[in-house]
Image (cartoon, rainbow, N blue to C red):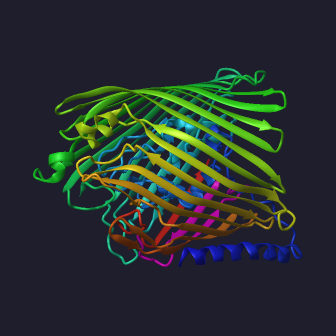
Amino acid sequence: MTLRALLLCSLSVAALLPAAARAQTTTTELDPVLVIDTGTESPAGTAPAGTAPATTVTADEIAQRQAGSLSDVLRGVPGVATNHAGNLLATNPSIRGFGGGGHMASDPSVQITLDGASTDGGRVYQNITSMLADPALMKSVTVLKGPLASLEYGSGITGGTVAMETITGADLTGDTPGFRFRQLLGANSNGKGWVTSSTLGWQPNDKLDVLFNYTRRAQGRQKDGDGAPIALDGFNVPSTLFKARYRIDAANSVTLSYTQSESSERDVPYGQLSGSAIFGNVNRDREGTVASVAWNYTPDDNALMDLELKYSRSTQQIDIVALDPSSFAARLFAGTFDLQTDRLTLKNTARFSTGSIDHTLRTGLDLSRQSRDTLNGSTPSGEADRVGVFAINEMAFGPDLTVTAGLRLERQTIEGQTSTGTIGPFDTTARTAGIGFEQALGQGFSAFGALTYGEGLASLDVFASRSASRGVLYGTDVQKSRTVEAGLKYSGNSAFIAGDTLSGSVTVYHTQVRDALYGVATSGEYPGFKMRGLEAELRYALDSGLYAQGAVSINNHSELFYSAAGAYAWRDFLYTPANSATITLGKTFDTGWDLSWTLRAADSITLDRGTVTRKAGWGVHDISVRYAPDEGALAGLSVDFGIENVFDRKYTDNLATQPEAGRNVKLTIAKTF
């Protein structure tokens, strides 16, 4: 099915829903209103005025999808491309074309955080080293797109930020004293996977709440729609979360958090996402931890103070042992890679007025040190120290106009150690500045737009990807970008009939990157990129419980290629996601049942990079059934049943080298005691 057909289908559905609703309202009493949660009260759940709206996937939505990986969670988010969603070890999201590459799996233009702490593990060639965050631990996952929306999280984040927030003890206990225990058991047919997740919440009094979670998720090698094994190995991954919060008084609280996960793979291809045997097979062990302590000060009588002081330490370790001593992996890539990131942040939100203008000013100080110890001969060790300050002022000029101004300054000192000696240190300053607006147009509509100039700092990986002749880019130069965003939003009730709710947005963006910190100097480099696209999403719900939602992403990305011969040429970007659409139709019943059908599809894509490559489009169907009563003897129980790729179609995402999984039947049962 082509994207044009999908769009016509979605428009037809949108046109038919009001008519169906009018027919229903004449015969039955209306059920309670269905509320589809699109946001969270935390700072991570909001985007500055002028930028693309933030998309938040809540814990209930994660559970209903029976998500087994971060890619599962992010399916259907406009502007985000995912593949290998059923494999916890292959999670590799792309935002607006950044990230998601099979060769350099990590990308500093995309930030992934866990409770505000970076989970970046750096670039180990063709391996993913980010934290293996299990969806069972998530309270919410929010996607912020573009550099202005991500300004709080760092410099050079031109793609966007995935902000994961873990559950707390108070979430389980309902913030009332006592014990609560939740047990989840699940299984899936394709790969004979299973998951168990045990969560204990304890709140002895109004001041202290504690949570402990242990999750283990396992799966064998999956099969594609033709029944052939996919060349990506299975996994057996344990994850642990401990969290404790102590409220000293009404204004002060201290929160401790510790998350740990690990994986062990044996006799698998070195190229983690490609499944290619060209480098030889390896044994690969990974472990990741994120620990943090935070103090929050929020006095009720002082609107100028909403303060958070947080220290976090993220450690990511990957150990690779080549099975064949003569293989390419043994000679260049095997070894132990140990990356540690320490970060201290002080952030405050002040609310005040100057004349007729209401301000929400968020400011922060950010100190970090990232060090990598590499015990092999090809990937350099190194250390990068950063000091950053930022300010984001959201100004409301009355009820109809909001203007956001943001600024970030960051100073870095970076040096590397290679087999030939020390490179650096280099001192660099990055500047990011942006302005956005949102203007109400009436009748529930508003227009928005933003312009952001950003500079990105080199990561430790730059020492491995640049020759000595390009040493200036080791740290004394910056990557530069300019991003323009514009769009239209709508939110309203009784849009077509009494009691319905409708919300949606359309965003267009254009990002241009120059002096890019990418490439291999010996064969060619990529000094520039142009990322252009459209993101749209729509949610509609009726009093009767009928609902529909959809998302569309249209991409047109290109790269500037510089060859060793000295020639520059623009061509299609290798990792351009195909145009895609997702449509969901469902019905919620007041008895606790929720039934839905989802169509996920991507258009065919042709890339001209000197040689023309065409990859076929695809469309697959999923169904989901949930039973979660709110009252009665079964209150606290949820049963989720789903079938992904109902018609067992063989298909391959254009960003992937391996097919996606064929038909997969899932069942998850959870109960809170």
Outermost residue, right side:
26
Asked if residue 132 lies left or right of residue 56, the reply is: left
Q: Residue at x 65, y 61 (%)?
A: 537
Q: Position of residue 464 (x, y in %)?
A: 27, 41
The segment highlighted magenta reads 623-652
Outermost residue, left side:
326
Verify whether residue 649 appears in magenta.
Answer: yes
The foreground one among 253 and 97 is: 97
Asked if residue 184 lies left or right of residue 523, the reply is: right
Verify whether residue 605 appears in magenta.
Answer: no
Asked if residue 497 lies left or right of residue 578, the reply is: right
Residue 489 placement: quadrant: bottom right
Q: Position of residue 609 (x, y in %)?
A: 35, 65
- Image vertical order of residue 465 relative to residue 96, above or below: above
- Image vertical order of residue 646 relative to residue 384, above or below: below
Give the number of callouts. 0
Please indicate, yes or no, whether residue 658 appears anywhere in the rendered image. Answer: yes
Q: Position of residue 506 (x, y in %)?
A: 66, 59
Residue 313 placement: quadrant: top left
Q: Position of residue 127 (x, y in %)?
A: 32, 50
Q: Residue at x 46, y 41 (%)?
A: 480
The foreground one among 541 and 1 is: 1
- Image vertical order of residue 576 relative to residue 617, above or below: above
The foreground one among 347 and 525 is: 525
Please indicate, yes or no, whether residue 162 appears anywhere in the rendered image. Answer: no
Q: Residue at x 76, y 61 (%)?
A: 502
